[in-house]
C-alpha cells in the first residue's frame, strides 16, 4: 500500500486509506453471508483522486471494486472462508498502513 500511495501527502494518504478500509469492511460483511460463489482468484481494483490539491468536496471518492472473475465457481452453498481470509488480511494491512500515516501526520512529517 505504501508503494501505491508513494508521493501522496501523509494526511491525504490517511484519508484515502480510511475510505478504502470502509469499503473493505463492506466487502467482508457481504462475503460473510454470501454462499453461492467460491473464488479461486479475483483482483481488487483500488482507485482514488491523485491530486491532493483538489478540494475535498470536489474529489472523486476512493473506491474498491472486485474485478476479474474468471476463476469463480457457482453453486457452492457455503461461505468462502479462504476468500474471506484474504479480504480480512488485506484490510488489516491497510489499517496498519493507515495508522502509520496517521502517526506521521501527528508528528508533523
Image (cartoon, helix red, strand yellow):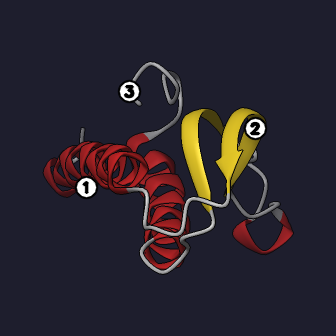
Foreground disc of the pair 1, 2: 2
Residue 72 image offset from top left, x and y in percent: 68, 40
Helix, strand or loop status at disc 1: helix
Badge 2: residue crowd in 10 Å (few <14, some 14–19, many ≥20): few
Quote the CA–CA distance across marks 1 and 2.
Answer: 34 Å
Asked whether the viewer can see residue 47, the reply is no
Q: In the rendered view, does 88 fall on the left or right side of 54? A: left
Helix, strand or loop status at disc 3: loop
Quarter assignment of residue 58: bottom right
Which badge, 1 or 2, comes first in the chain's sequence? 2
Which badge, 3 or 2, comes first in the chain's sequence? 3
Which residue matches tag 2? 69
Q: Which of 58 and 27 is in front in this view?
A: 27
Total labels: the figure holds: 3
Residue 45 image offset from top left, x and y in percent: 69, 39
Q: Nearer the viewer, residue 47 or 65?
A: 65
Quote the CA–CA distance across marks 3 and 2.
Answer: 26 Å
**Residue at 63% in and 33% down:** 43
Which residue matches tag 3? 2
Above or below residue 22? Residue 90 is above
Q: In the rendered view, does 5 fall on the left or right side of 45? A: left
Amino acid at each position: 500500500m505504501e508503494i501505491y500511495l508513494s508521493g501522496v501527502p501523509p494526511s491525504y494518504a490517511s484519508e484515502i486509506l480510511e475510505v478504502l478500509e470502509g469499503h473493505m469492511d463492506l466487502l467482508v460483511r457481504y462475503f460473510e453471508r454470501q454462499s453461492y460463489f467460491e473464488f479461486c482468484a479475483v483482483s481488487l481494483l483500488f482507485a482514488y483522486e491523485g491530486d491532493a490539491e483538489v478540494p475535498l468536496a470536489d474529489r472523486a471518492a476512493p473506491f474498491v471494486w472486485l474485478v476479474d472473475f474468471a476463476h469463480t465457481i457457482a453453486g457452492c452453498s457455503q461461505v468462502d472462508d479462504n476468500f474471506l481470509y484474504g479480504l480480512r488480511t488485506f484490510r488489516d494491512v491497510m489499517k496498519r498502513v493507515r495508522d502509520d500515516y496517521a502517526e506521521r501526520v501527528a508528528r508533523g512529517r
